[in-house]
Image (cartoon, rainbow, N blue to C red):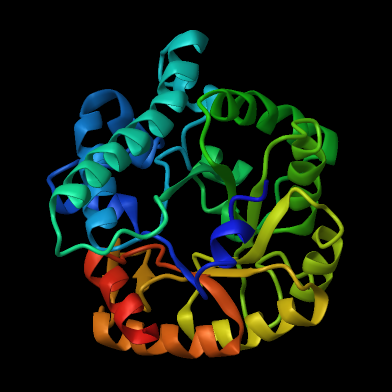
Amino acid sequence: MNPISEPLKNQPFLILDGAMATELERRGADLNDSLWSAKILRETPELIRDVHLDYFRAEADIAITASYQATIEGFTRWGLSRATAIDLIQKSVYLAQEARTLYLAETLRNTEYEIRNPPLIAASIGPYGAYLADGSEYRGDYGLTEDELIKFHRPRMAALIAAEPDLLACETIPCLLEARALVQLLTRFPNTYAWFTFTARDDTHTCHGEPLAECAAFLDPFEQVSAIGINCTAPKHLPGLIREIRRATSKPIIVYPNSGETYDPATKTWLGEMDCDAFGAQARDWYAAGAQIIGGCCRTTPEHIRAIRAGIE
């Protein structure tokens, strides 16, 4: 059963959560490491659980696990054993599940909350470039073959599936080649569904340069692909990108852009406005354009997620 299409039969849209790293840093976590937020899985995992819980309290329908940059290769490079690496990858799912259990328990006790469909847990599978930690997830210039990418992604995908999330989030994909590798790997796990979201450099192209409509058309025949869309991209590009996806597929469209701020690598700071109300107003436009699953990526917060629901409803 497709975990995305079923709830969309009963409600017109689903709300994703927002940034994990932003919230961890706001709570005092030091993410200056090649593992980024994945290092917190070992150091202070309760922080991750609490971030998930706050997003559920902000009425997110779906939580994305803190496994984006959690890979076996990354953890073993950090000095951990392969078995420990797998345990930490799976812990990312268990923490989200624990947060969901806590949220549902307090929801049932609190009549202020309307009980919707129980939140879904999407296990994040970040791109190969996230493991490299050199920004190549925004270029896709890995120099690897499709088979090499399948070999890299397989152990983590298998570990995450064994932890029983509701679906996978194949996200921040910069190029069609990596999407091809991931969907071919997905077919080897026939009872698993996943969404696929690309990074984009303009209104029509992935960061690597392929037409987004071509990527959506390639993924469209795969029944295990629950939704297709965009993440970790400037909000200004979304209306055009949604149109490109809709030209190529009838699958649900999922979008979770960055806050709208821009990152200055020289100063390592974010510049621009982080206006939650403006983000919510833009979400209304994305929904009108055809997106049915909407959330936030870098620099977004629980306040952004509340603003999305308020903006659409």
Left or right, residue 133 beside residue 280: right
Q: Residue at x 58, y 60 (%)?
A: 138
Does any portion of residue 141 appear in the rendered image?
A: yes
The image quarter containing residue 58 is bottom left
Residue at 49% of width from left, 27% of height from top?
74
Q: Is residue 211 left or right of 78 when viewed as pictured?
A: right
Regarding residue 32, the answer to whether it shows in the image is no
Please provide percent x and percent y for residue 195. 63, 54
Q: Nearer the viewer, residue 225 or 255?
A: 225
Q: Is residue 272 above or below residue 267?
A: below
Residue at 36% over, 89% down:
281
Give the percent coordinates (x, y) of residue 68: 48, 43
Q: Which residue does the image show at 53% across and 70% down from the upper left?
A: 255
Q: Quadrant of residue 252?
A: bottom right
Q: Position of residue 42 (x, y in %)?
A: 29, 23
| Left or right placement of residue 305 versus residue 188 in this view | left
Say above or below: 188 vs 308.
above
Residue 11 rendering spot, x and y as whole percentages: 50, 71
Total residue callouts: 0
Which image quarter is the C terminus in?
bottom left
